[in-house]
Image (cartoon, helix red, strand yellow):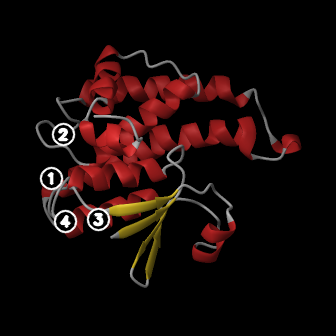
Amino acid sequence: MYQIYGSPKTRALRVTWLLEELGQPYDVDPVGPGDAKVKELNGSGKVPVLVEGEAVLSDSTAIMTYLADKHGALTFPAGTLDRARQDALTHTILDEFDAILWTAARHSFVLPQDQRVPAIKESLVWEFSRNAARLAERFEGPFLMGETMTIADIICAHCLSWAKNAGFPIESEVLSEYGKAMRARPAFRRAIGQPA
């Protein structure tokens, strides 16, 4: 049984979605960032945190990579060219989607008021849109890497939902339809607590 700390409105959703796809048992404490329980486990106070026995892991991508490797699913084997391509795609999404959305969130509500630069959002929306167009050109379908779903798909679909909720337009019909298909997966529905 895995113990996850983090609200489904955070990157913790990526981990619970992965565990649902893997069919692994877990328990969630839906605490937010900075919660005292989280700070005891992760000094930064960031979620998600995974506890497995005595081991504590943080960072959604690191947790997902560990779990996918451990259970031999939603990833290509380490040391293969397909894994290198998967890792490159994962890091591209983190850099070109996740980082942009996180910057927008920080300047919208995370940072202290006097440190926010609300005007930055216009530039971030432009950059996100440009990056999404490039990703759409690379899209193989039905998943990012063709017939095989990987952790990159979970991160990407999560970012597309985040973007939509943050008012970032998803101009690519390919990515819009892909995001809908990913959110329709039974494992995703279970992870957010809705009937599959």
Disc 3, SS = helix
Q: Position of residue 85 (x, y in %)?
A: 22, 50
Judging by the rendered image, the residue that carries numbered circle 2 is 145
Q: Amino acid at mark 1?
A: Asp
Packing grade of label 3 (10 A; few <14, some 14-19, many >=20) is many
First in sequence: mark 2 or mark 1? 1
First in sequence: mark 1 or mark 3? 3
Judging by the rendered image, the residue that carries numbered circle 4 is 71
Disc 2, SS = loop
For residue 185, side relative to residue 47 (left or right): left
CA–CA distance in space, label 2 to label 1: 9 Å
**Closer to us: 33 or 62:** 33
The answer to whether the residues at label 4 and label 3 have Cβ atoms under 8 Å apart is: yes
> Among all residues in the image, which is located at the extreme front?
195
Q: Amino acid at mark 3?
A: Leu
Judging by the rendered image, the residue that carries numbered circle 3 is 67
> Among all residues in the image, which is located at the extreme right?
114
Packing grade of label 1 (10 A; few <14, some 14-19, many >=20) is some
The answer to whether the residues at label 2 and label 1 have Cβ atoms under 8 Å apart is: yes
Q: Position of residue 126 (x, y in %)?
A: 55, 22
Q: Is label 3 or label 2 in front?
A: 3
Q: Position of residue 112 (x, y in %)?
A: 83, 47
Q: Amino acid at mark 4?
A: His
CA–CA distance in space, label 3 to label 2: 19 Å
Judging by the rendered image, the residue that carries numbered circle 1 is 82
CA–CA distance in space, label 2 to label 4: 20 Å
First in sequence: mark 3 or mark 2? 3
> Among all residues in the image, which is located at the extreme bottom?
54
